[in-house]
Amino acid sequence: MTARTLASDSGDPGQSPPDSQAGRKPVIVREDLIAAALRLTGAHRSVSTLSLREVAREAGIAPNSFYRQFHDMDELAVALIELAGESLRNIVGDARKRAVAGRSIVRGSLEAFMERLRADDKLLHVLLREGTVGSDAFKRAVDRQLQFFEVELRADLVRIAAAQGIVFHEPGLVARAITRLVFAMGGTALDSPPERDEALVDELSHMIRMLLRGAHAMGKVKGQR
């Protein structure tokens, strides 16, 4: 949709509404639009369903002013996904702290993940939902963020294996499998009651340990050849 079309839709076919109108902010920054989009999302509302006009109204600006910060809604959504990726990597950092404190890195990671999920972390919700219901551009942006997580997890697996004197077969592939599994189960958790969280963490922990033990067994076989 063009800026001219938006101006027409606003009720003034010749001009875009001035930002100084009552109720509208004279100055707007990218963070204001991102915050407005986040406020409009929810358990049953994906970023991909938001319109430019909705976000502009929520931010308190004229629709045409949106273009001063983003080219279109796709660019705004990708910015949200990138912030969501940072949120996910913060979860990894939290899990590492738990592991240092003597907790299982698997259990600690999953508990940190669920805590952020239940803390109404809308950025994390965006990451979980846009990977399944968003446009191709959104899905590619989500995939890029998950790849960052996979790289960090692979480094953790290599470090743990070296400390324990073992070998994981294809640690990069194992990291990818674990990341995609947790991502998929996290999407399921969004639609499940909190009472299911402990059972879900137990189930996920078991699945991840199976993946790790399988990778360890395959590494041993490869080392014996």
Image (tube, rainbow, N blue to C red):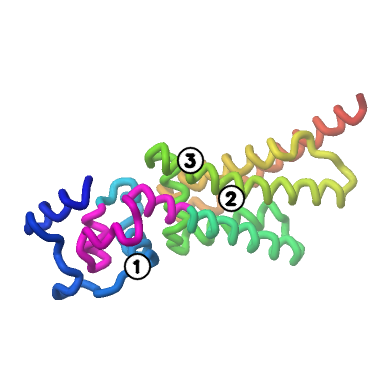
Q: Is residue 203 visible in the rendered structure shown here?
A: no
Q: Residues within 10 Å of mark 2 (few under 14, many from 20)?
A: many
Let me know if residue 75 is in the magenta part.
yes
Q: Name the N-terminal-most of marks 3 and 1.
A: 1
Q: Residue at x 12, y 57 (%)?
A: 10
Which residue is disc 1 drawn over?
32
Decide: few, some or many residues near mark 1? Use Cα within 10 Å; few <14, some 14-19, many ≥20.
some
Quarter location, residue 22: bottom left
Badge nearest the viewer, 1 or 2: 1
Which is in the foreground here, disc 3 or disc 2?
3
Q: Which residues are magenta?
A: 52-81
* Residue beneath the point at 64% across and 39% down: 176
Task: Out of 143 and 100, give the one closest to the viewer.
Answer: 143
Measure how far apart labels 3 and 1 are at the Cα level: 24 Å
Outermost residue, front side: 14
Residue in view at x 43 percent, y 55 percent: 79
On residue 201, the disc is 2
Residue 44 location (% of width, % of height): 32, 49
Mark 1 or mark 2: whose residue is earlier in sequence = 1
Left or right: 29 in relation to 117:
left
Q: CA distance from mark 1 to mark 2?
A: 35 Å
Precedes in sequence: disc 3 or disc 2: 3
The label on residue 140 is 3
